[in-house]
Image (cartoon, rainbow, N blue to C red):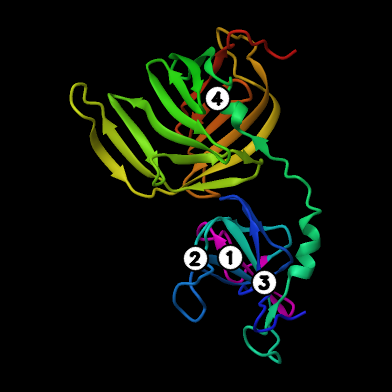
Amino acid sequence: KYCDANKLCLPGHNGWDIPIPMGGPFKCAVSGEVIWVSDHRPSGGPSDYGWHVRVRTGGYVIIYAHMAASPPVAVGDMVVGGQVLGFSGNTGASSGPHLHFEIRHCLTSLPEWPWCIIDCSPFLEPLRNNLPEPDNVDMLPYFQVVPVGVGPFYVFQHSNGVTENIQHQMGNGEVYIVKNHQYEHLRVTNSHIERLEDTSPGNNQFYMLDDGYGWSRWCPRFWRPGDKFFRSPDIRVFEKGGQKPCVMLKEDLGVGSWLRFEDWLPTWTSPKSNASPNGITLAEVSHFSFAWTHDGPSLEDYWFAKGVGLTQWMNNSGDHSWISDLPQGRQPLD
């Protein structure tokens, strides 16, 4: 079925918009050859599609548009159904993260746009009400470990031999992860885990992440292992001035990075320590990694246990920290 000049598949629109959380994967619908990867039109100039990929299969071209950044495929690549072509974003003429999915007939005997556009709605509409519920993990109990008040107290062991006391303090959706005399300030919303100030650098300094609203989205509230989340906050480092106002020391604008949901573990056991010679086994642990690019080497890895919070951290320099003493009132798994 071909679109006519007035309909364009959806009124005034060439394709089908599918909401996908920021950083979620765009997967190839059918095998073919990548013929265009850019945030510009083939004829030149910025494209309303933003970063997008065009795949030719038989007599058709499929367009996957509004990716977060330059995709991990290149012109000439042969791709297969189910392969990740890129990640959901908001580039181009877009009002929110989503996939613009468009099919064009590329037979030369057909007129040019808009009559070359294929109406994909007859194929996609029947699927709308038959999609299974996504196997999302709710991050709320991994960060807001008690509804309100003071959470459990536990001890972190660092690879340099230093120990650190950690406690979650919560109220009205605000979460403070207190580490000795430092803290991280988080907020849990219906859509994201947001990060505000963080005093953990020490040296009388703290930093703030800002998406333009005074805070930054650290990760989605609901997401799945394999998902990747793109962040691009401004980073501002301040010096605490005692009797003087805080002084900004450094500002990095729009630093892009990725948080990746690596895996979800039914059970996880911490490394051994003097306090826990056999390690500590906890249930329902989510593992994340931080990187500059969606498929680049990990710079930091984090493990969070449901009802406990942060249980392990390591970076690419070999520094390593882990939970070494059980929170009060919590028992290890049998």
Q: Are marks 1 and 2 in contact (CB under 8 Å)?
A: yes
Q: Determine the image quadrant of residue 245.
A: top left
Residue 288's x, y, as percent? 57, 36
Q: Callout 1, which amino acid?
A: Ala
Q: Which residue is mark 2?
A: 92
Question: Mark 1 against mark 4, which lies toward the viewer?
Answer: 1
Task: Measure the alpha-carbon separation of dots 3 and 1.
Answer: 16 Å
Q: Are marks 3 and 1 in contact (CB under 8 Å)?
A: no
From the viewer's side, name the closer residue of 274 and 230. 230
> Disc number at residue 10?
3
Q: Which residue is mark 1?
A: 65
Q: Earlier in the sequence, mark 2 or mark 3?
A: 3
Q: Callout 3, which amino acid?
A: Leu
Q: Are marks 4 and 3 in contact (CB under 8 Å)?
A: no
Task: Measure the alpha-carbon separation of dots 4 and 2.
Answer: 38 Å
Q: Is residue 27 above or below residue 133?
A: below
Question: Mark 4 against mark 3, which lies toward the viewer?
Answer: 3
Q: Earlier in the sequence, mark 1 or mark 2?
A: 1
From the viewer's side, name the closer residue of 122 and 166. 122
Q: Secondary structure at mark 2?
A: loop
Q: Earlier in the sequence, mark 4 or mark 2?
A: 2
From the viewer's side, name the closer residue of 162 and 181. 181
Left or right of residue 329, residue 182 in this image: left
Q: Which residue is mark 4?
A: 312
Left or right of residue 156, residue 125 in this image: right
Image: magenta residue range: 56-78
Q: Determine the image quadrant of residue 209.
A: top left
Question: Mark 4 against mark 2, which lies toward the viewer?
Answer: 2
Q: Secondary structure at mark 3?
A: loop
